[in-house]
Image (spheres, rainbow, N blue to C red):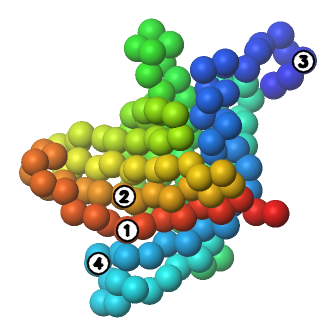
Amino acid sequence: MKGDGMERNTELERVAEIFVGEWVLTVTNQWWLDDPSTVISGVAKGEWLGDSFIRLHAELNGLPAWEFIFGRSDARDQFVVLYHDERGVQRIFELALDGDTWVMSRNDPDFHQRLLGRVEGDRMVGQTDASDDQGVTWRKDFDLIFERAK
């Protein structure tokens, strides 16, 4: 919050460059649907929460879908991401940035999961994968496209 003597986390600025803004979403290739070619549309908004967190909230088909809160553990030199969705699911991910790619991953007892993304100008192309055998084999959950709203 500007004016309170705090400064923005400079490392988190890297995350803001990717996720802050307004987005049009497209979700495709969802393996669990009867027709995986079904296209689901939505919107997302990424914004700063104070000076140390970034919120990315998404709606699909006009309904709240999921939310990510990005933060950082300076002691671990690591980005952390809190997640929850409309089902009441709550998860913690690690975020890794490498140039124009990003990976959110979690290795939890229920299953392993990763979200892979690539920044292409005003667009991000990504997919989510899951593993039920501790990361030995992976299945694609769905594809996701973020396009910056004009």
* Disc 1, SS: strand
Identify residue type, mark 4. Answer: Trp
Identify residue type, mark 3. Answer: Gly
Query: What is the CA distance from the residue labelled 3 to the residue labelled 1?
Result: 42 Å
- Give residue 122's position: percent from left, percent from top: 68, 55
Q: Are marks 3 and 1 in contact (CB under 8 Å)?
A: no
Query: What is the CA distance from the residue labelled 2 to the residue labelled 3?
Result: 39 Å
Mark 2 or mark 3, which is nearer to you? Answer: 2
Label whose residue precedes the other's in the sequence (3 or 4): 3
Q: Are marks 1 and 4 in contact (CB under 8 Å)?
A: no
Query: What is the CA distance from the residue labelled 3 to the residue labelled 4?
Result: 48 Å
Location of mark 2 (residue): 128
Location of mark 1 (residue): 142
Query: What is the CA distance from the residue labelled 2 to the residue labelled 4?
Result: 13 Å
Location of mark 3 (residue): 3
Residue at image coords 37%, 68%: 142
- Give residue 34's position: percent from left, percent from top: 30, 90
* Disc 2, SS: strand
**Residue 31 in the image: above or below residue 96:** below
Q: Are marks 3 and 4 in contact (CB under 8 Å)?
A: no
Label whose residue precedes the other's in the sequence (2 or 4): 4
Q: Are marks 1 and 2 in contact (CB under 8 Å)?
A: yes
**Left or right placement of residue 95 versus residue 7 in this view:** left
**Left or right placement of residue 138 versus residue 103 in this view:** left
- Give residue 19's position: percent from left, percent from top: 63, 45
- Give residue 105's position: percent from left, percent from top: 34, 41
